[in-house]
Image (cartoon, helix red, strand yellow):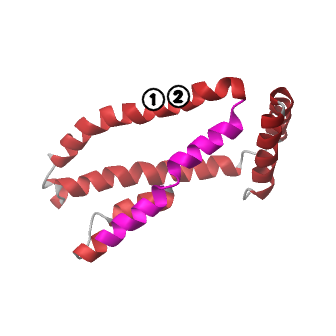
């Protein structure tokens, strides 16, 4: 997420058409796995009885983001000339800042996550879910033991 935000920042100042095209390709490569990755994590972290609700909330959030993002994009495009930036540059700035900040915050939070209380909760979820819980348990413990501290 951080690298995607950095690429969006870089798109604010392309030196040539080729550089902008390169930034667009890099941005697409960085976010291509976001949606499948979120669905993957939701299937591992929510028991089967709660999974449909979690996925539907995520899908609804993407639609709400579009409803909010459309008018916000219009406002940002109207900021043409503010601080010597074109409106389209404001769009990339507004996309890059939250991605970098939220990515850094998520990285910081996840580095402190794997406590004993979390493992107890995962064990309880594993036993309540049967085979699906066992798969989630294996993936979660792999993540916990491989996570940077």
Up/down of 148 relative to 141, above or below: below
Percent coordinates x, y for residue 70 in the rendering: 26, 38
For residue 96, which quarter of the picture?
A: bottom left
Q: CA distance from mark 1 to mark 2?
A: 6 Å
Closest to the observer: 119 or 32? 32
What's the mark number on residue 80?
none
Q: Residue at x 25, y 53 (%)?
A: 90
Using the rendered view, name the quadrant where residue 11 is placed.
Answer: bottom left
Q: Is residue 31 magenta?
A: yes
Magenta stretch prevailing secondary structure: helix
Measured as percent of width and height from the top left, residue 116 is found at 85, 40
Q: Residue at x 36, y 60 (%)?
A: 8
Q: Which residues are magenta?
A: 21-47
Dot 2: element: helix
Quarter of the figure with residue 113: top right
Q: Tag 1: Cα neighbours inside 10 Å, few (<14), some, or many (≥20)?
A: few
Q: Which mark is residue 56?
A: 2
From this view, report whether residue 139 is shown above or below residue 64.
Answer: below
In magenta stretch: residue 94: no
Q: In the picture provided, is 96 more to the left or to the right than 83? A: right
Residue beneath disc 1: 60
Q: Residue at x 42, y 36 (%)?
A: 62
How far from the left and from the top, in percent, is residue 72?
26, 39
Q: Are marks 1 and 2 in contact (CB under 8 Å)?
A: yes
Tell whether 69 sits left or right of 36.
Answer: left
């Amino acid at each position: 997420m951080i690298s995607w935000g950095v690429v969006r920042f870089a798109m604010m100042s392309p030196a040539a058409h080729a550089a902008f095209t390169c930034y667009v390709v890099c941005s697409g490569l960085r976010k291509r796995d976001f949606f499948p990755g979120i669905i993957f994590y939701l299937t591992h972290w929510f028991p089967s009885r709660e999974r449909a609700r979690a996925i539907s909330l995520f899908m609804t959030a993407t639609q709400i983001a579009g409803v909010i993002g459309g008018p916000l994009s219009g406002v940002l495009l109207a900021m043409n000339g503010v601080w010597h930036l074109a409106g389209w540059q404001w769009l990339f700035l507004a996309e890059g800042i939250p991605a970098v900040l939220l990515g850094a915050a998520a990285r910081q939070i996840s580095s402190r996550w794997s406590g004993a209380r979390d493992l107890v909760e995962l064990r309880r979820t594993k036993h309540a879910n049967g085979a699906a819980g066992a798969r989630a348990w294996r993936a979660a413990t792999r993540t916990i033991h491989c996570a940077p501290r």
